[in-house]
Amino acid sequence: MQKNNLIHINQKLSFIGFRIAYDSTDFDLKPIDKVNLDIERTLIDAAYLAMDDFRVLSILMTWVKVHGEYVIVEKFFKLAKIAMKERGHNPVINGIAVWGSLCKQTKWTRYIYKSKKNEFLVDKEISKLTANYKGYKADWLKLGVKVPLKLIRIREADVYTAKELAKNNLQFRNRLIIGSSWRSDIVTAIDYGLTNPYMISKTIGCSYEPAHRVFREYNLTK
């Protein structure tokens, strides 16, 4: 069972642009299924994996550097709040906002919380042991997060380029065209086959009013 779960999350990570291996023979996704392979939800799943898997942590932060401008930040933190209630506190969530801000993606900045105790990004004992040799990243420390200097490896080859990702991921492609917004995700849901505003709002997590309005406007174009 664990193997299948691991393959499934790896497929989700690959679908949003992580260069990570998975067994493609285990899953045959129909277009309607892909609406659930959501960018923000998958980033949150990656953040929980990253607490124990530092390779995933590095790819996650690389993804944010390359594609963070295309995240719907309000949606990300709305879903993250729910996830932390269900799955426990996760400092990597705040770390994503810190790193996005450090990468000059200013929309992340208002979501950074500063810990008076300088919260560790990952396991405290591992972080202390690693930092004994090299110290902590100064720019992260200014924003209240302790990250050993050598913990994160940013290598852009570990994620798909925007062109590669847009070719295979409709949600990302629509964000390039429309912008990173609920409207874009509503259009994506319609493109994937969701047939009414109620279904759209429940599936993607937006309120009914924008789902109804965009659904009506979309159908005016046909």
Image (cartoon, rainbow, N blue to C red):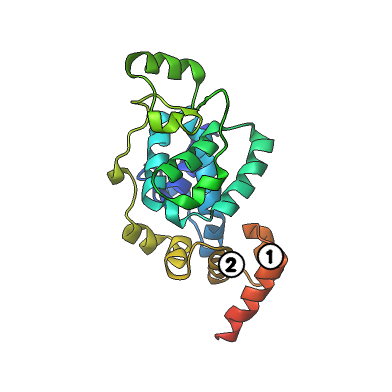
Label 2 sits on what residue type?
Answer: Ile
At label 1, counting other C-alpha atoms closer than 10 Å, the crowd grade (few under 14, some 14-19, many 20 or more) is some
Q: As displayed, is residue 142 above or below residue 162?
A: above
Residue at which label 2 appears: 186
Residue at left offset 48%, top offset 70%: 178
Residue 204 in picture, x, y percent from top left: 62, 59
Residue 214 x %, y %: 62, 74
Circle on res. 64: none
Please name the residue shown 57% across and 49% down the image.
Answer: 76
The image quadrant that residue 137 belongs to is top left
Q: Are marks 2 and 1 in contact (CB under 8 Å)?
A: no
Residue 148, by quadrant, is top left
The C terminus - image quarter: bottom right
The residue identified by callout 1 is 199
State the residue in front, 50 or 98.
98
Which is more N-terminal, label 1 or label 2?
A: 2
Name which residue lies at 60% across and 47% down: 77
Closer to the camera in the image, 181 or 43: 181
Residue 4 appears anywhere in the view? no
Vertical position of residue 45 compared to residue 151: above or below = below
Which amino acid, by three-letter code, is at mark 1? Met
Point out residue 2 in the picture as x, y percentages from the top left corner. 53, 32
User: Looking at the image, how many numbered discs can be counted on the residues?
Assistant: 2
Nearer-the-camera pick, 127 or 137: 137
Asked which secondary structure carries label 1, the reply is helix
